[in-house]
Amino acid sequence: MAKLKWGMIGGGEGSQIGPAHRLGAQADGLFEFAAGALDHRPEAGRAYAQRLGVPADRAYGDWQEMLAGEKDRPDRIDLVTIATPNATHFEIAKAYLEAGFNVLCEKPMTMTVEEGEEIVRVARASGRICAVNYCYSAYPMVRQARAMVRAGEIGKVRLVVTNFSHGHHGDATDADNPRVRWRYDPAMAGVSGQFADCGIHALHMASFICDDKVATLSADMASTISSRQLEDDAMVNFRMEGGTVGRLWTSSVAIGRQHGFDIQVFGETGGLRWASEHPNQLIYTPVGGRTQIIEKGEGGLHDDAMRLSRVAIAHPEGFPLAVANIYCDLADAIRGEPRDGLPDAADGVRSIAAVHAAVASARAEGAWQDARPPMFR
């Protein structure tokens, strides 16, 4: 089967997320890295793309040049990944969808709910895929957890507790670090800092595993480092459409926590726990029974968990391979076999609607807000 052609915007030299996309897209031989506009400095972007093996005539200076160069090629790219700062996502994603390209966008998909709803409409009208990189949902044992919930193996879900908290932005003297500064700048990040950066991963994960949607929420946010315009810590309570109660904490000033993303799902007949720092294990406790460790790669797993496990039991599969699983699902979808677990533009707009609802709630001293985008109410 011929490789699909893939292009990338952003994610240049020194980028935090760029290498994960390049490893993920090419891990299974499904995509060829064919085009790129990798840096806001045109010459640096062109040079870096060529060092990575992109042909010189497809190493572009910016996303507009790449769009113009690719749209009429007979061998044009099948998928473009957008890994640029938040404020640029909407314009780039809309332009590429309208030109008939499939898109994978980093989160948050847009800055506003209105932009998010527009992306949903444009994707539907174009007939193209617009996926959002909620890659943690592609770990095999997360897929196992979702399948167990869907199969009724823990009964009706009563409560979900999740957090994504780390301490890597806890040094106030590091405020001018460009990799940190933009995340708390409204012009670059939007209305929210930490919740829009990490908290929405946890919120999406809750919806994904519970197979339900967030309906309402109440939030408290704080900028614990006074120079920051946006929050670096947030606590969010939420209720899901199916009645599940949710609790979420997210922080970037929790010094001592390295990654800190985990989720616990409590049902009528059992509970599940997954942590990103131990991603190959799912902890399962049946009511009245002993706690069990379900291992990635062992026999008897649900189909989706088996499909997305590459190596034998006891061999770790980490973050780049979770990203690779998103690309596996994208390749299948592009070839006409959609995968149920692929996060799409609807997930993206639900996330940004929750971000705006959380900001409004925090400003109103925790008043409960409708967390759904208007198009899904």
Image (cartoon, rainbow, N blue to C red):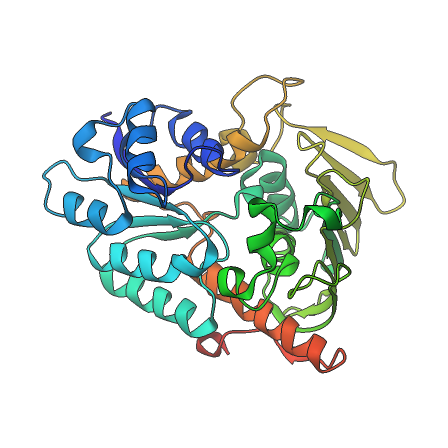
Residue drawn at (26%, 54%) of the image: 96
Q: Quadrant of residue 247?
A: bottom right
Q: Quadrant of the N terminus?
A: top left
Q: Quadrant of residue 360?
A: bottom right
Residue 31 seen in render: no
Percent across and percent down for residue 14 are 49, 34
Q: Is residue 97 left or right of residue 252?
A: left
Which one is nearer the viewer's eye here, 116 or 152? 116
Compared with 39, 239 (above or below) is below
Q: Is residue 162 left or right of residue 5?
A: right
Which one is nearer the viewer's eye here, 101 or 302? 101
Q: Is residue 282 left or right of residue 55?
A: right
Compared with 248, 342 (above or below) is above
Q: Is residue 244 left or right of residue 49?
A: right
Percent across and percent down for residue 282 are 71, 36
Residue drawn at (68%, 46%) of the image: 174
Residue drawn at (44%, 27%) of the image: 23
Q: How many marks?
A: 0
Percent across and percent down for residue 213 are 58, 65
Percent across and percent down for residue 255 are 80, 44
Which one is nearer the viewer's eye here, 248 or 250? 250
Residue 310 seen in render: yes
Which one is nearer the viewer's eye here, 356 or 350? 356
Compared with 94, 334 (above or below) is above
Compared with 174, 352 (above or below) is below
Residue drawn at (82%, 39%) of the image: 256
